[in-house]
Amino acid sequence: MKNIYNNILQSITNDEKLLAVLIDPDKFSIRTAEDFLNRVNKSVATHIFVGGSEVEGQQTGILVKALRRFTQLPIILFPGDVTQVTNEADGILFLSLISGRNSEYLIGKHVKSVSRLSETELEIIPTGYMLIENGKETAVERVTGTKPLSRVNIQLIEDTAKAGEFLGMKLMYLEAGSGATHPVTVEIISKVKKNIQIPLIVGGGIRTRQQLDEAYNSGADLVVIGTAFEEDESFFDSLKKKI
């Protein structure tokens, strides 16, 4: 499956909101894949993201191959490290942690991944990744050694997103972090959206339909939900497709 990015742009043109289900290989049991994906397929989800901050060895490839058996949705890698690159997926968010200043996550890991990516047919989508303070330390902070941007310094968040766009990023990702105490605020989403011309992804801390709708109404083009489904699969019930 190709043209992931162009399809995202087309969906935005058509005023269609997108939803990605994030699956962390370190937390997901392959034994539950069929039942979980059946729920995903019946929901309004449009994409599946696979990845995490701390994933061992070949877990990602094994998981993506298993997921492929039960869904036709595009599977996109959301990698925390080069070890999570696998040709089993359709595409990869080529994430640069532009909210931090650790060169390994700004460009270093990317250089190390080139030889591996050149052996795949993945659609590579340059993505500015911005960690926003949410009230608790996240795995991203621990692994990358970087601090999130303060929720109250909205101007810095806006400027960082715009700088990422100027650098050529095709997507901008505002992330509160896995298991966030609270999601990225509607004010931050709204102001960043108004300041950039590229699609905006928002994730972390969204646990209710109301929070999902607030993210969309504030300007998010694609919302990512992970923990909410991990903790309560009945959340899918509020996201079923309309027949």
Image (cartoon, helix red, strand yellow):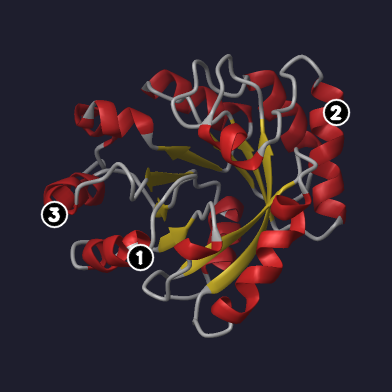
Left or right: 93 with respect to 83?
right
Q: Secondary structure at mark 1?
A: loop
Left or right: 142 with respect to 162?
left
Marking on residue 156: 2
Label 3 Cα crowd, 10 Å radius (few <14 / some 14-19 / many 20+): some
Q: Which residue is painted at 44% across and 52% down in the image?
A: 51
Residue type for callout 1: Gln
Residue 84 pos. (x, y %)? 46, 62
Residue 4 pos. (x, y %)? 51, 66
Q: Nearer the viewer, residue 117 or 38?
A: 117
Picture quarter with the N terminus: bottom left
Q: Which residue is painted at 78% across and 35% down in the image?
A: 194
> Where 21 sits versus 4, above or below?
above
Marking on residue 58: 1
> Toward which corner of the image does residue 87 lie, by quadrant?
bottom left
Q: Which residue matches tag 3?
A: 34
| Number of numbered discs overlaid on the protein picture | 3
Q: Secondary structure at mark 2?
A: helix
Mark 3 or 1, closer to the camera: 1
Picture quarter with the C terminus: top left
Distance Cα–Cα, label 3 vs label 2:
43 Å
Residue type for callout 2: Leu
